[in-house]
Image: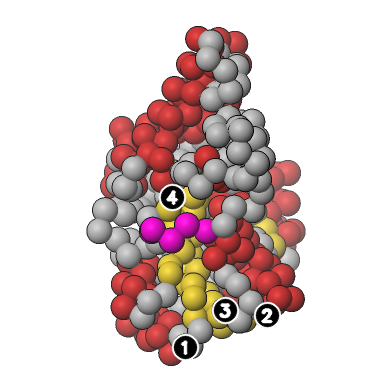
Amino acid sequence: MIYLDNGATTFPKPYSVKNAVMKSIHCYGANPGRSGHKMSLKAAETVYSCRENASVLFKCKSPENVIIMPNCTTALNTVIKGILSPGDHAVISSLEHNAVVRPLEKLKEIGVEYSIAECIPCDDEATIDNFRKSFKSNTRLVICTHASNVFGIKLPVERIAALCRINGILCCVDAAQTAGIEDIDLTDSCIDYLCTAGHKGLYGPMGTGLLIINSDIIPESLIQGGTGSMSSELTQPSILPDKFESGTPNLPCIAGLNEGIKFVIDKTTKRIREDESILMNMLYNGLSKIRNVVLYAPPPEIKYFTPVLSFNIVGFSSEEISSILDSNYSIATRAGLHCAPLAHKQFGTEDIGTVRAVMSAFSTPSQVQLLLRAVKEIIYTKK
């Protein structure tokens, strides 16, 4: 199969990731942080190694500030629901995922409001100005995607975060589509909370995510329970990362995530980004020359876009195209709204969706050429 559904989850995974998952099950599958025996200590070392490598990749304050989550959605919910209170106001971009919008819609029930700042593709100044105009006296938090999971459009998150800092507003960035591809340095950043998936650009298994806290203001935890620490106390520990990691952790997947992060560090985000961008430009240029193919964004210049591309073919629904690519050509893409209706509304595709192709470190030029050939054949057959 030609796998181009890397925006949902990357595939294949590096061999080191697969091996780490199996090794954790066979060699040290004990509960980390709950016992003092050798196997439990080895498991705990693996979890801590994952934090250490994540702190190296994102250059955050301390490994303890790296919270291991089940996914990016849980990380985002933790920040949104752990920071906002009745009477607060939040601002989001017009490209946000439902992992941001739905928690905010739920918080409307207790009196939290939010505004939407329109993202202007390839015009950072206009985008930043739209965020500035959306601020209110009670704005407490800005939640902003680093890049659209539908159209690949990057937002100037560091500048938006700096604007937030000047105005006394906290900033949370959703890096689900950029972690492992874009350089993210939290050393002197005004980003307060970085949320990301572990199974996408970090090449870990599904069921992993990260919340990196880069602020002295700590959200409330969504759940409470056993942490393996301070067990005599009936209240949840306040120390990091224990405050947010109740219950037995997913050790096999954390072991895999650790190796995925190491894979990115060794390969470097710069090389991954450049290689994927070359392939995406090849795909964009090829599609732009095919009659009846509809593209929705400008050419994916590396400054303004990540390697994510959406398209349609006149006379077909996005679901039809993706199904034909799968059944007739063994090419995996994703069709529909991609859990991001706001982005589709901005681009006028909320009724038809799009076909999405996303590159990974394992994508090749021949795969791009086969997709282009398949699109041409689908259009020719329709005629």
Quarter residue 1 falls in: top right
Q: Main secondary structure of the magenta part?
A: loop
Number of residues whose C-alpha sits closer than 10 Å to that of mark 4, classed few (under 14), some (14–19) or many (20 or more): many
Q: Earlier in the sequence, mark 1 or mark 2?
A: 2
In the image, what residue occupies the spot 32% across and 36% down? 265
293 relative position to 239: left or right: right
Q: What span is in magenta?
A: 215-219
In terms of secondary structure, where does tag 3 sit? loop
The residue carrying mark 4 is 212
In terms of secondary structure, where does tag 2 sit? loop
The residue carrying mark 2 is 111
Amino acid residing under circle 4: Ile
Rendered position, 339 above or below 269:
below
The disc label shown at residue 88, or none: 3
The disc label shown at residue 137, or none: 1
Rendered position, 151 above or below 228:
below
Amino acid residing under circle 1: Ser
Q: Earlier in the sequence, mark 3 or mark 1?
A: 3
Amino acid residing under circle 3: Asp
